[in-house]
Amino acid sequence: MTTYTLYLRSGKTKADAAYYINEQGNMVSFIFDPANTDYQAYLAWLAEGNTPLPAPEPEPAPVLTTEQKLEAAGLTVAELKELFGLE
């Protein structure tokens, strides 16, 4: 029996895609598009009274210190101070 799992695509706040594992053991993913045959099969599966597994919760964004943010931008605190004439 096929089981579908919802998922959130990057930048989305609501699940607009799903996936399932096919008979060969491969993951098949698809977006919710009426022209997509996998989506049509998913809608038929829902109409039979099935419920997909919920989308996994997205990982929370890491909390970075000011120094870590500057480092990610290729700067140091000293360089920033010099840039603004604070030294």
Image: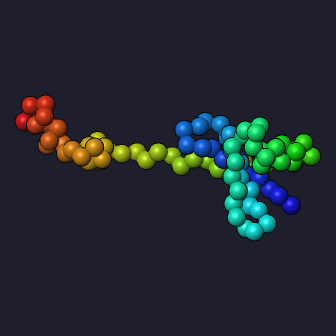
Quadrant occupied by the C terminus:
top left
Q: Quick one: 79 or 34, which is closer to the camera?
A: 34
Q: Quadrant of residue 2?
A: bottom right
Using residue 34 as the reference point, say whether residue 13 is left or right of it: left
Where does residue 16 sit, x and y in percent of width and height? 68, 40
Horizontally, residue 2 falls left or right of residue 59, namely right
Task: Using the image, determine if residue 84 lies above or below residue 43.
Answer: above
In the rendered view, does 67 fall on the left or right side of 9? left
Q: Position of residue 54 (x, y in %)?
A: 72, 47
Task: Give the quadrant of residue 69.
Answer: top left
Q: Residue furthest right?
A: 48
Residue at horizontal 19 percent and vertical 45 percent from the top? 76
- Residue 61 placed where, x, y %? 47, 45
> Is any part of residue 10 visible from this angle?
yes
For the N terminus, give its image quadrant.
bottom right
Q: Quadrant of residue 64?
A: top left
What colour scheme governs how the chains and residues are painted in the rendered image of this protein?
rainbow
Residue 18 location in percent, x, y?
71, 48
Q: Residue at x 10, y 37 (%)?
A: 82
Q: Nearer the viewer, residue 31 or 81?
A: 31
